[in-house]
Amino acid sequence: MASLNVRAALLSVSFLIVALGLWEMATQPPEAQTGLTEYERMMGGVEQESRVPPPSAVLRLAWEELSDPFYDAGANDKGIGIQLAYSVYRVLAGYVAAMAIALPIGFLIGMSPLMYKALNPYIQLLRPISPLAWMPLALFIIQDSDASAIFVIFICSIWPMLLNTAFGVANVRQDWVNVARTHELGPMRTALTVILPAAAPTILTGMRISIGIAWLVIVAAEMLVGGTGIGYYVWNEWNNLDLASVIFSILMIGVVGMLLDLALGKAQKLVEYKE
Amino acid sequence: MSKSILEVDGLSKVYPDGQGGDLTVFEDVRFALEKGEFVCIIGHSGCGKSTILNVLAGLDEASSGNVVMNGKEIKGPGLERGVVFQNYSLFPWKTTLSNITFAVRARWPQWSKEKVREHSESYLKMVGLDHALRRKPSQLSGGMRQRVSIARAFATQPELLLLDEPFGALDALTRGVIQDELVKIWEETRQTVFMITHDVDEAILLSDRIFLMSNGPNARIAESVKVDIPHPRARATIFQNPAYHKTRDYLVDFLVNRSGGALPEEDGSPKFVEPAKGVASPQAAAAESAAKAVNG
Ligand SMILES: Nc1ncnc2c1ncn2[C@@H]1O[C@H](COP(=O)(O)OP(=O)(O)OP(=O)(O)O)[C@@H](O)[C@H]1O
Ligand SMILES: [Mg+2]
């Protein structure tokens, strides 16, 4: 009996083969023109371009793109690697800025019921706003499309981090705080050596949610502001009716999103503790 | 009471009873601890033992009364008072060793890294855990965790150690082994200890005096029972001492029959009894002391 992992892997691969096979079959060009409707005959047959490309075409394109991901041949013709790098850069810039604000304020709110009560109404009001709704205002105020995209990432990744930090800090076991108190640790030492490690798993959960949302939002934001980035790339290829490229970049968005999540998952493992 | 390191006077704790009124958990509690003394406090559940201990630790505030240590009123926690909590309260993200070094460094910030480490290791060795330095608390059994917690408290060499049912969550076998270790450590260090327990035998094995608390609400520390058994003591041989049985009978009788309405002296300090001297009840003790007063 093979181990569970081996069997799962075999099953995964067979699902993939079946799905690709069905896709390939469904997208074969029609052999004869006999089955055409009146309308199609008038239009001169099924147009080649408007069909969804078969997986073989996507794979061929993927091979081409990935063998030279960083070429740069002008504004509308850059390698997938460059486009992804732009997006990752924007996500990280907005994300780090959000961290710099969310962690200290989350700490403050978590430690002080007064601050929690004072700030909570604003958080509850701002949190449900779609990050893209900020885009026009950001464009008007910042006057720079790149910085506006970063701002949108900032605003969407701040909330899960802020709320999880506050929750984690507020729920640190009173016993541990008491140990810190009986050892006369100052407020700064207590925050850094007791509260932070105690709340770290909850904080990291918030950070992991944030990076996921940021990666979802960057695609939409780049479709809006244009210029560079994977979101712009997808939209541009759609305008070119290059569906193989669209499908390929969708897959790449998935791959990068998964890698970002994996990285945060690793970090989460590092700070986890068993009681 | 010249060597008292701790004096408690008129201590009471009042909580709202949830129906608009007040609930006085305990009131007018008065006692003193001598330097180097091991004192246990026994009383029925809910009478306020933990609350008293937390007030002494500075983690809780009394509704009235004051606690004076070495002539200074206690206002908040301090390193001169070490606490062992019932649920160990080790930091689960730290190893056994760094759970101790953190405390030692807090106590002596000027010490070098090596000295802190050496000192911490010696206390872990004292509780027989020098083989588990690198393990996290989650990888230790309940008994081992409580040993670490005891080592942490002793390692900071506080003037007063406060233990809240330190063995409450342990099985009888483990409990016995750690009691022996505690006896051994205490014989070496002779620190002043104030400990809560529900276990009469444990109290006799460890204490010089045992405080008996009446039932709440309005609980009092009614009596202070002397345990007249010489140190060093051992769990295996303490039964052979006749004073052991007299003391035990006295304590059980209090807990079963008298804890309801027992009262301390007029001034609020606990009645001092010595069961080993054959004084069977505080009434007799009162009669004796009255007789003494009359005689001169
Ligand atoms: N926050 C609170 N509000 C109201 N009553 C409280 C509060 N905390 C404790 N009490 C009451 O104070 C009393 C004393 O509690 P405490 O924990 O000191 O008892 P204890 O003697 O340590 O009991 P045990 O032996 O079960 O540990 C209890 O009756 C409890 O109901
Ligand atoms: Mg208690």
Image (tube, helix red, strand yellow):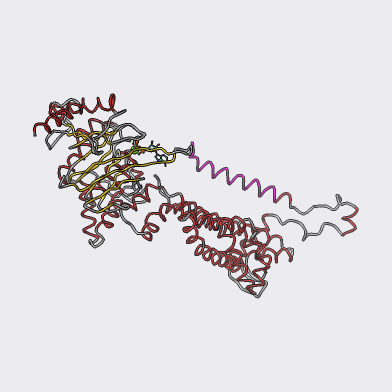
Residue B224 located within the stretch drawn in magenta: no
Percent position (x, y) of residue B137?
34, 45
Up-down: is A46 above or below A140? above
Q: Is residue A68 visible?
A: no
Residue located 53% across and 54% down the image: A117
In the rendered structure, the answer to whether residue B205 lies left or right of residue B143 reads left
Identify the residue at the far left of this view: B296
Percent position (x, y) of residue B255?
28, 27
Image quadrant where residue B278 sits = top left
Up-down: is A8 above or below A123? above
Q: Quadrant of the N terminus of chain B?
A: top left
Q: Quadrant of the C terminus of chain B?
A: top left
Quadrant of the image where one finds ligand 2: top left
Up-down: is B3 above or below A234? above
Percent position (x, y) of residue B72?
25, 54
Residue located 26% across and 48% down the image: B153
In the rendered structure, the answer to whether residue B180 lies left or right of residue A223 reads left
Image quadrant where residue A77 sits = bottom right
State the residue in front, A270 or B10. B10
Residue located 23% across and 57% down the image: B116
Q: Is residue A129 visible?
A: yes
Q: Main secondary structure of the magenta part?
A: helix
In the rendered structure, the answer to whether residue B28 lies left or right of residue B33 reads right
Residues rendered magenta in the picture? A1-23
State the residue in front, A83 or B284. B284
Marks counted in the figure total 0
State the residue in front, A95 or A256. A95
In the rendered structure, the answer to whether residue B95 lies left or right of residue B251 reads right
Percent position (x, y) of residue A108?
47, 59
Residue A10 located within the stretch drawn in magenta: yes
